[in-house]
Amino acid sequence: MIGKSYFLLSLLQVGLSLEWKGDTPSEMTAQEGSCVQIPCRYSYPSHLTNQPRIGIWYKNEERGTKPTAFHSEEHNRISSQFRNRTRLSGDLKDGNCSLIIHSVRQGDAGSYYFRIEFDVKNSYSYYPVTRLHVSTELSKKWKCDTPREVTAQEGSCVQIPCQYSYPSCLGNQPRVGIWFNNEKQSSSSIAFHSEDHNQEAPQFHNRTRLSGDLKDGDCSLIINSVTRGDAGSYFFRIEFDGGNRYSYHPVTRLRVSAEQSQEWKGDTPREVTVQEGSCVQIPCQYSYPSCLGNQPRVGIWFNNEKQSSSSIAFHSGDHNQEAPQFRNRTRLSGDLKDGDCSLIINSVTRGDAGPYYFRIEFDKKNSYNYHPVTRLHVSDFTDKPTIFPAEIIAGKRVDISCTFNTTCNGTAPVLTWDTPTDVPGSVSNTVTQHGVTLTYTSVLTLIPSLKHHGHNLTCRVRYPSVSSEWILGLTVQSASETSKPRNAALGQSPLERALGQAHCLYLSSNLDLIPHQVNRGRFRDGQYSLVCRVDFCPGFKTEAAVWYRAPLLWSMLIPLGTCGDTSSSSSSFTRGPCSSLVSVNKRNSSKWPVGSLTAGIMFSVCVAGILVFVCVRNTIGLSASDPFVPSDPGRVFHCPGSSAWNESCCHRFQALTHRHTDNPDNLLYANINLLNLSSDDGTVHMSEGRNTHRSDSSETECETG
């Protein structure tokens, strides 16, 4: 029984001893005259956590004595050789028992260990010991990073970058930073003194400061209003309380130049174009000498190539100095402290055109004009919103989106809708940004009926002084029309998808293919119309309109003749439209591959034919008696027996096919028929069509019967 009790007691003692742990290095080296820290962490049984404690450091002497190097409770018990030179770097309650010894001597070398005392029964000495070596060599912890040379502009400011380090035992000690303007330490050459500015040499009074905090290891020196006499060698010295001090070398050589500092840089575009009435942003990034980093500044934009108080477009310090025509219309898009000087001009006018440049002012001696200038061009307002059509079914709710893009974060455009008066709708607006592009989106939600088929839906974008619009003709379908099988993935029949992918190219006489926008019509009595219209400059000669869709399942090559300016004595015009109208009907076909191949062959033959036609005509010319060619190359096209058109020239074409109701969603095919201009009586009869030209309208209309 006694043996078992002894065994259990032994196990308990072993378990408790495992809770007494210490972590100290086995060896340390200190520089004589400096300080040293012996890192130490300790642990103890958890039931003693809130108990008072005493921390003691002992030094083992070879003769067997153990002088006390540090005593946390009674400093009188500290050996005379360590008194007033030792302390703990942390708090014993946090498990930190690190010892710091200041002004290290050769006699401090030896073995050290730590002991903790809670009470008589709960005390512990932590082993193994730490052996301290004392060296006369300089500690490698004294380090400094400064450039070997720095160049300053006379009259400006300069910063000598500086980062320094020191032994960790000095981390919380008070310190003094000193800069000397000499390779040798001398009281007459002190350029900066962090503790007593009166010790600074007279020529540096009120001109020097540090850019950071010495406690953060930043010793960078700033010299304002640099003079020629400031040139020379500079070095930094740190002095801690208790005799720990160090002069950092090598020196930094400062050179003073009359040339402009390379740190003044600006990045602006050479040209910017804006539409009248909208807003514009002139991108701008600038840099300056680092010594001015935290200084107050004023940013100014001039609308002139020369600095003039009457041409100030923007002034960050005093808006009253801005020219009247710019007041309340200009601002910066960013923060000058971030190097962003981008200018925004709202409600742009024609008078805003011209050169612009940016100027920064820190003080009278630190200002700079950034060149070259940016030239602003102002054009007409032509941007339009875009409506994205949606399938509209009578009696069902539909969302129709209208968007407008801009790269200027100034006056925001406003999107509005014009709808049929008896169609109530709700509108939601959002703004998204992708890179520098802002997209304004307005979504109109409405429930139309069949009577609204053919009515117009208008989306309008407004700025304070300008606006533009996009008009969409409503195509309202009945629920019965939409009950037919559709492609589930796209929600459209193959015919509708084909028409939706139609494109138009105009083939010019020099064989250039010029793409143009297609105005899409709507189904009416099973027929769908597409109009390709071009407004061209004088002298532009259009040979044909090429209709196609990709992949190439159908295509049409439609000769147009020549349209251009005229010198006719009866009438003249400088611009005129040419239009190509294609009307298509649904047609049954069960052999898509054959149809596709046939269409491709027809397209290739037509293209080859028109190219041969153009090349031959350009080579040998065509007879003036040909009714499709003007006798005077500078005159407009004449139809047989008719005079020159007053407003435009127009050729009309119709591609008619037959519809079979047994399979209306099959791919369309087109038979192309050319309808020429009318005779004097206004009509010309052909086997499959009738053309009517009405000159009483402001725009020539081509109608198909």
Image (tube, rainbow, N blue to C red):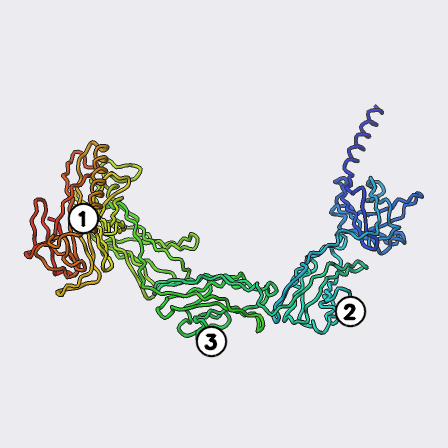
Q: Is residue 454 above or below residue 669?
A: below
Q: Position of residue 238 (x, y in %)?
A: 75, 60
Residue topped by disc 1: 559
**Residue at (5%, 56%) from the top-left corner?**
681
Which residue is situated farthest in the left direction here?
681
C-alpha gap between disc 3 and disc 1: 62 Å
Element marked by disc 1: strand
Task: Report if the CB atoms under discs 3 and 2 are less than 8 Å apart.
Answer: no
Mark 2 element type: helix
Which residue is label 2 attached to?
Answer: 187
Who comes first in sequence, dot 1 or dot 2?
A: 2
In this rendering, is residue 107 above or below 124? below
- Provide the residue designation for mark 3: 309
Task: Name the image quarter holding residue 217.
Answer: bottom right
Residue type, mark 2 in image: Ser
Q: Residue furthest front?
A: 620
Using the image as rendered, state which of residue 538 and residue 189 is in the foreground: 538
